Image (cartoon, rainbow, N blue to C red):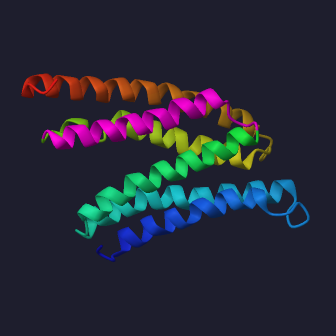
Amino acid sequence: MPLNLPNILTWLRILLIPLVVAVYYFPDSWWLSQERNIAAALMFSVAAVTDWLDGYLARVLKQTSAFGAFLDPVADKLMVAAALIVLVQLHRVDALIALIIIGREITISALREWMASIGARGSVAVSKLGKIKTAAQMLAIVLLLWNAPLWGIDIHQWGVWLIWIAAIFTLWSMVYYLRCALTEAIRRGQS
């Protein structure tokens, strides 16, 4: 495992996951409700920024590695799944939304593994659609963790709208990836 800045940022993201969750399990006497929300939202924001930054730095610094390519999506999926489970428990996200988003992540991960096994991993490479989905999802989760008005803006409602938009992009991108993979598998005679 190469220890470089991009991988350190990915490990930081992984370490932030239990902290975001733990905030909601500290005794009530330790935190006011909104203090918990702010802490979780800020930690998740830092984790989301490292998601973008580690990939960017790996490319710019030419520090890409097979381990980093493996660890980065695992960290992303753990981060999103943990936050969604917390948000479902807090009644801020519908379980259906969490099921759609987490189910898609598992499906696409399995699809990428299968495509890699037939030598066609590039046919399910991250697309612009997937990046839009990720941006909407990350922002929605931050807003739903924050869950309080800010400068007169109903942050919770914006988070709800964005998580639904993210769910729609989630399904759309899943269909896109599945179609790309099926086309490639048929072309290779692997279906």
Rendered residue at 50%/63% (across/down): 13
Quarter of the picture holding the C terminus: top left
Q: Is residue 69 above or below residue 133?
A: below
Say which quarter of the image contains residue 66. Answer: bottom left
**Residue 121 in view here:** no
The verdict on residue 102 being magenta is: yes
The residue most toward the left is 188
Quick one: 44 or 17, which is closer to the camera? 17
Quick one: 181 or 34, which is closer to the camera? 181
Q: Is residue 74 above or below residue 103?
A: below
Q: Is residue 95 above or below residue 54?
A: above
Rendered residue at 54%/47% (across/down): 80
Quick one: 10 or 188, which is closer to the camera? 188
Residue 64 horizontal/vertical position (percent): 25, 64
What residue span does the magenta drawing correspond to?
Answer: 91-118
**Residue 116 in view here:** yes
Q: Main secondary structure of the magenta part?
A: helix
| Residue 189 left/right relative to 162 | left
Residue 44 horizontal/vertical position (percent): 60, 56
The verdict on residue 95 being magenta is: yes
Quarter of the picture holding the N terminus: bottom left
Residue 122 horizontal/vertical position (percent): 19, 41
